Amino acid sequence: MEEKKPSTADILAKIRAQKAAAAAAAGDVPAAPAETPAPATTPAPAAETVAPAPATSGAKPTSTKDIMAAIRGGGAKPAAAAPPAAVAPPAGDAPKPAVAAAGPRPSVQDMLKAVREGKVGAAAAAPSATAKVGTPVAAPPMPAKPVVASKAAKPASARRSLAVVATVASISAASFVLGFAVGSNLLIALGACVWGVLMTPFAAAWFSVASIGGIWTLGTARFMFPNVLVEPPSKFKVGPLSDYPINTVSNKWKDQFGVWIVHTDQYEGRNMIFALTSVCTHLGCTPNWLDGEQKFKCPCHGSGFYITGVNFEGPAPRPLERAGLRIAEDGMLEVNKSVKYQEEMGQWSDPTSFVSVV
Ligand code: FES
């Protein structure tokens, strides 16, 4: 039968036993059994020889881990426990009570649980920790959560500075606009000074962007309201017949309605009142009534018209046109510009183109 190679524990036990025997023989120290009595499960014969592993055990410790566990006397792994003869501590080797009392180290879950319960530094108070650890374990402090700056925490000085920038920009812009509108160099200079002294480049850039956006918005809004040409009514009353003496031309309604009210007896010898439109028949300019010369004179090309409206000089090819005229139910003269009467067409003989005065 092949002889088995002794393990490290066996060698160590043998060495310690030899040292103990030598010391006992020299009489320097008391015998080993008196100093550290061997337990009942570890008989003395182990000190002399390394006993082979019992056949019944079948689990001879071969690894260093098993050997160290057997030496410390732990019973967590029965399989690793060597036979008493093989791994029993010698008489001179004192056990390590501190390690044995400490037991297994606390798990990470136990430490995190203790921290969550606010018992940092007193993990021993946690039931689970004490149950498994047995000794108080100080949990490491958790790192402080970084504080994120929010918008609400924006300092009030920043908001005030924004208000100041808006005020300064408004004052400066108002000074510029008003200065250019009224032609005042003083206001323009004031606006430039305010802008140059108080505005920062960053604020000026933002103000410019906001101004462009505002102008664009106003232009778009203006586009939504197109120009509407409000024309005067085609029918309007010009007062009683007595307001217009004979051989006179009234300019009262020229600017508002574009007609002269003429009272004359020079056209075919008939005393009548009619309304002449103030549009030159040459190219559409507005003639003027020259009371001293008793004629209409066009300022554009010099065409002249009699008080009756008939052309007599200049490039005008035909007489002025009449508008409709009648006496309304209330006795007032009523002009109707929606109809035109042309002398060369024989339309002046139409009774709706004049009012006879008897
Ligand atoms: Fe009146 Fe030419 S437009 S004369």
Image: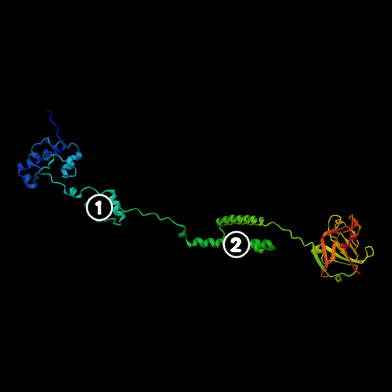
Q: Considering only order in the chain, which callout, 1 or 2, is on the residue closer to the N terminus?
A: 1
Q: What amino acid type should be assigned to the residue bearing mark 1?
A: Ala
Q: Is residue 219 left or right of residue 241?
A: left
Task: State the CA–CA distance, disc 2 to disc 1.
Answer: 69 Å
Do we see residue 314 in this rendering?
no
User: What SS does tag 1 mark?
Assistant: helix
| Along the line of sight, the residue nearer the viewer: 327 or 314 | 327
Query: Which secondary structure, mark 2?
Result: helix
Q: Residues within 10 Å of mark 2 (few under 14, many from 20)?
A: some
Q: Which residue is mark 1?
A: 129
Q: Which mark is residue 279?
A: none
Mark 1 surroundings within 10 Å by alpha-carbon count, few (fewer than 14), some (14 through 19), many (20 or more): many
- Give how far across and how far down residue 6 sits, in percent: 14, 34
Left or right placement of residue 154 versus residue 13 in this view? right
Q: Quadrant of the N terminus?
A: top left
Confirm or deny contact between disc 2 and disc 1 (CB under 8 A).
Answer: no
* Residue 355 image point, x, y percent: 88, 66
Kind of residue sitting beneath label 2: Ser
**Label of residue 170 in the image:** 2
The x, y position of residue 239, in whole percent, is 82, 69
x then y, percent, for residue 332:
83, 69
Q: Nearer the viewer, residue 10 or 347?
A: 347
In which quadrant is the C terminus drawn?
Answer: bottom right
Q: Nearer the viewer, residue 254 or 74?
A: 254
- Where residue 310 sits, quadrant-wise, is bottom right
Q: Is residue 206 left or right of residue 223?
A: left
Q: Is residue 257 left or right of residue 67?
A: right
| 118 over 53 or under it: above or below | below
